[in-house]
Amino acid sequence: MIVTLTLNPSLDRTLALDSLRRGEVLRATSARIDPGGKGVNVTRVLRAFGVASHAVIPCAGPDGEELARLLQNDGVPVTEVQVDGWTRSNITLAEADGRVTKVNAPGGALTGREVALLAEAVLDRCVSQDPANAGASWAVLSGSLPPGVPDDVYATLTAQFAEHGVRVAVDTSGAALLAAVDAGPDLVKPNRQELAAAVGTPLNSIGEVVAAAEKLCSRGVKAVLASLGADGSVLVDSSGALFGTAEAIEPVSTVGAGDALLAGFLAAGGEGGQALIEGMAWARAAVGLPGSQMPGPPDVSREGIRVVRDPGGKPAGSLHLADNG
């Protein structure tokens, strides 16, 4: 079982356009609405592959009700914690040439009491004594923080869950990522930009990405899974560094690719080269789908994915497909 906590979930509204021209009235060629939020996406893709997962989300207002309804209609197990405020809606503008413009709303504020209720809901799933729910192998804490939530919330939750023997993966950015690193989670999954910000230096080669990941490990993180968009992924843990590359495909939308990477990696055991290959296969499949749509088994191919150990000074290339981490 993999339980996900998304403190700032969303409705993701995607409009397809021939091209985005500022200041003009445009007509969308298609429109779709998907459940959104990084943890929500992780649970969605895990369930599509038949992997036991449960999403925990705050729910507020009509958009929160719509989010819960969409998840339930998709057969996604979800615990909704009723909170004050509102659930945000994000807008994605997807152009025909593959360029994506995403506008993320800030979301409603969460109080300390509401965060505590969400944490309690995660632990209820993780350490349940119900034979039908044998407990969670991982708790995934992911996404941006809504207003009112302190930067160290993921650090606090990491320590809290670790006390109950739950392995923790964190996927966030900025101050929240830095605080979580010092709490010693089992895994963090930054993209290239987030990792560069965490160590305070640009990352222009695979060797620099590895060195940055090693810095995070030296602060207590057990493993770093860094997504590099079209240039692949790097995994650094106590056994060393692995660099994975994949044959390029024509991107439709990069939204959710990092979430699919993390989901596939955890589903395959959460360590080692085979897990890296699986995560990359799921991420590549997500890039080929529109909007926030998550892949399933028919979308995935593992052909053309290669993993090498100790990549050292291999050039990172253009890194042009920045992950939406």
Image: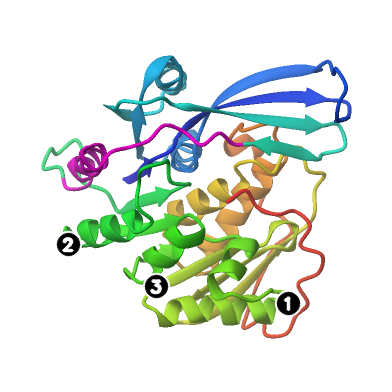
Extreme left residue here?
A: 129
> Does residue 302 show up magenta in the picture?
no
Determine which residue is flagged by label 2: 163
Vertical relation: 282 (above or below) 192: above
Give the quarter of the figure containing the N terminus: top left
Could you tell me residue 203's position as x and y percent?
A: 69, 74
Could you tell me residue 215's position as x and y percent?
A: 50, 81
Name the residue located 23 percent from the left edge and 56 percent from the top edge.
161
Determine which residue is flagged by label 3: 221
> Does 123 sit left or right of 105 as displayed?
left
Vertical relation: 232 (above or below) 71: below
Within 10 Å of disc 1 (Cα), the crowding (few <14, some 14-19, many 20+) is some
Label for residue 205? 1
Within 10 Å of disc 2 (Cα), the crowding (few <14, some 14-19, many 20+) is few
> Does 35 sit left or right of 182 as displayed?
right
Instruction: Identify the amino acid type marked 3.
Output: Val
> Does residue 109 show up magenta in the picture?
yes
| Separation of residues labelled 1 and 3 (CA atoms) | 22 Å
**Residue 231 visible in the picture:** yes
Within 10 Å of disc 3 (Cα), the crowding (few <14, some 14-19, many 20+) is many
- State the predominant SS element of the stretch in magenta: helix
Name the residue located 61 percent from the left edge and 31 percent from the top edge.
293
| Separation of residues labelled 1 and 2 (CA atoms) | 37 Å
Could you tell me residue 164's position as x and y percent?
A: 16, 58
Q: Which residues are magenta?
A: 104-127
Q: Earlier in the sequence, mark 2 or mark 3?
A: 2
Mark 2 residue element: loop
Residue 122, picture quadrant: top left
> Does 122 sit left or right of 30 as displayed?
left
The foreground one among 115 and 188 is: 115
